[in-house]
Image (tube, rainbow, N blue to C red):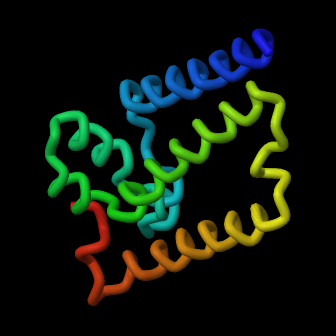
Amino acid sequence: MRRRALIALGIFLALGAGAVALLLLRPPCLILEYTGFYCAGCGTQRMVLALLRGDLKSAAGLNIFMLATLPAAGIYAAIEAVRYVRGERLLCRAKGFVPVLLGVLAAAAVFTLLRNQPGLRWLAPA
């Protein structure tokens, strides 16, 4: 169990280091750069920075989809880590995981399409 806890901690530290690196390096969105269209993730870096400043209104204006999805993904990751450390069956191996994942990906695709429509430019990063 101790080995599993160290593995889970290592994964979370690596994910945290990756997130900090993205915030510091601020790489451009390749989809936006090459197509001119906003993807579902465009504005996420600035959204996180706005959240760190405590500006929820600006964060929502930058990427409302990620503002809703990232906390849910974090909670899911924490639950999976606890289940892994305890040696329990992971949720990603459950029967309903793939449909839920496909639903989230479909929602991201719909959000991407909507935020690039002329009448819905308010969904694009401000």
Depth order, front residue of 124/79: 79
Question: Left or right: 88 with respect to 49?
Answer: right
Quadrant the N terminus occupies: top right
Depth order, front residue of 16/38: 16
Question: Left or right: 65 with respect to 118?
Answer: right
Q: Is residue 85 above or below residue 114?
A: above
Residue 42 drawn at (x, y percent): 40, 56
Within the image, what quadrant is residue 50 found in? top left
Task: Please name the residue shown 15% across and 57% down the image.
Answer: 57
Residue 124 drawn at (x, y percent): 31, 68
Residue 48 drawn at (x, y percent): 32, 41
Q: Is residue 39 above or below residue 21?
A: below
Task: Please name the residue shown 30% across and 72% down the image.
Answer: 123
Quadrant the C terminus occupies: bottom left
Task: Please name the residue shown 25% across and 59% down the image.
Answer: 60
Question: Left or right: 87 with respect to 57?
Answer: right
Q: How many marks?
A: 0
Task: Please name the residue shown 24% across and 42% down the image.
Answer: 51
